[in-house]
Image (cartoon, helix red, strand yellow):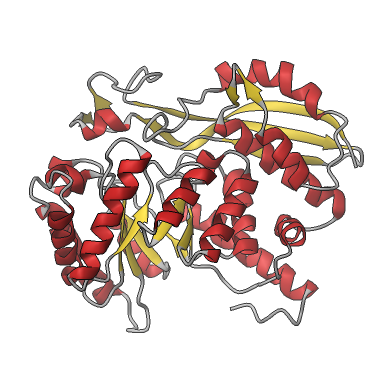
Amino acid sequence: MKITNVQFSPGVSSFYFDDQAAIKGGAGMDGFIYVGPAATPGFDSIRQSGEAISVLIELENGQWAEGDCAAVQYSGAGGRDPLFTAERYIPWMSSVLRPLLIGRDVSKFLENARFIDQLTADGRQIHTAIRYGLSQALLDATAKATNRLKLEVVCDEYGLPIDPSPLKLFGQSGDDRYNAVDKMIMKRVDALPHGLINNVSTKLGENGGRLQEYVTWLTQRIMKLRGSAAYLPTIHIDVYGTIGLIFQNNPVAIARYLGELEERAGQFPLYIEGPVDVGNRQDQIELLGAIKRQLREIGSEVRIVADEWCNTYQDIVGFVDAGCCDMVQIKTPDLGSVHNAIEAVLYCHSHGVEAYLGGTCNETDVSARACLHIAQATRPQRVLIKPGMGFDEGLTIVANEMRRNQSILQAKYPTAGAVQ
């Protein structure tokens, strides 16, 4: 089955592009808008409307496959590609990519994914967002051309078993970190709340006191609203390197503070994402490793999640091989073609590190559903509920896609296990 036509459609993503450097530097807010000058190259303001580009591929049988190019909220930070806009990239995609795609055979996904992932412009790989969306569309094209689910394509091409059992889903609160928790508890989310602790003075506290109070509140809130003691969600908080800021990246002080948070979390497992951000991959690996060792020395079971400077498949291999973290966030838009995310999950599994198939609030429904298929094929320990910061909308997209696929798989493979 070959490609006969390709279209690129400008679209909107489910959140915004935010200048992380300016926010961490103390930018104030006026309503929903950050005030002050931008600090990251490419940004005209600290918060800008999120954008996406839909890739639409027509097949010989008349079906259209789709994928959405999207970039992370904090574009240009932590070694990531720059700000992604439709106005800048659609003309190039139309003139350069369309001719490369028309006429390609889509009967196999992986060879096409690797082809587009190796494309260059101006001496470097094309933007991660483009590779991300285009590979989603190529995966969808293979699925439509061969009458399979996208997850079946992945399982078949990587030799993975079909497993219809449910995945563990992780909710993100955005700045609504109190009301969103109530919603997550009501809907029995497996891990919560992300928290968006990206500012010292307003969210972490100059001595970490604000986050300590929040973890205490969070624990008490779960116990009050959960109804049954059988509901034991994992507490997973992303702190964007702010803990390192208040403790001058001292691993002993950081580990001691994390141990205090663990005490407040009580019976609920605690994962801390991005406790430090030291500005480059090697130093990040070394400091995370030092924190992890110190935690074990003091008897703490806090789990460290790598995020900043762990962007590409090669980065993930480096973090995993170093043994510096307990879990890796595989931030799907940052890896380019989705086959890199597939292989990153499998690499984590083969080396005893937990895999968190994440991404960003700044994606779309199309990219979120594509990632859910990848997750159902590769079975990471945690899957981000996305897109958007409203929680309920993302849960509807991800959880319902998962359950629909479970029902289809149960019908097609009745001996694969019961849907729960």
Could you tell me how many numbered marks the image carries?
Answer: 0
Above or below, 372 against 85 in this view is below
Closer-to-camera residue (228/291): 291
Residue 100: quarter of image: top right
Seen in the image, is 386 located left or right of residue 273? right
Seen in the image, is 219 located left or right of residue 372? left
Seen in the image, is 308 located left or right of residue 351? left
Q: Can residue 195 be seen?
A: no
Locate the N terminus and report the quarter of the image it occupies. top right
**Residue drawn where x is 48% and y is 49% of the image:** 316
Residue 117: quarter of image: top right
Above or below, 243 against 98 in this view is below
**Residue 405 locus on image (x, y percent):** 68, 64
Locate the C terminus and report the quarter of the image it occupies. bottom right
Closer-to-camera residue (187/360): 360
**Residue 44 locus on image (x, y percent):** 36, 17
**Residue drawn where x is 13% and y is 62% of the image:** 256
**Residue 165 locus on image (x, y percent):** 60, 74
**Residue drawn where x is 80% and y is 22% of the image:** 99
Residue 18: quarter of image: top left
**Residue 226 locus on image (x, y percent):** 32, 76
**Residue drawn where x is 18% and y is 54% of the image:** 251
Q: Can residue 343 be seen?
A: yes
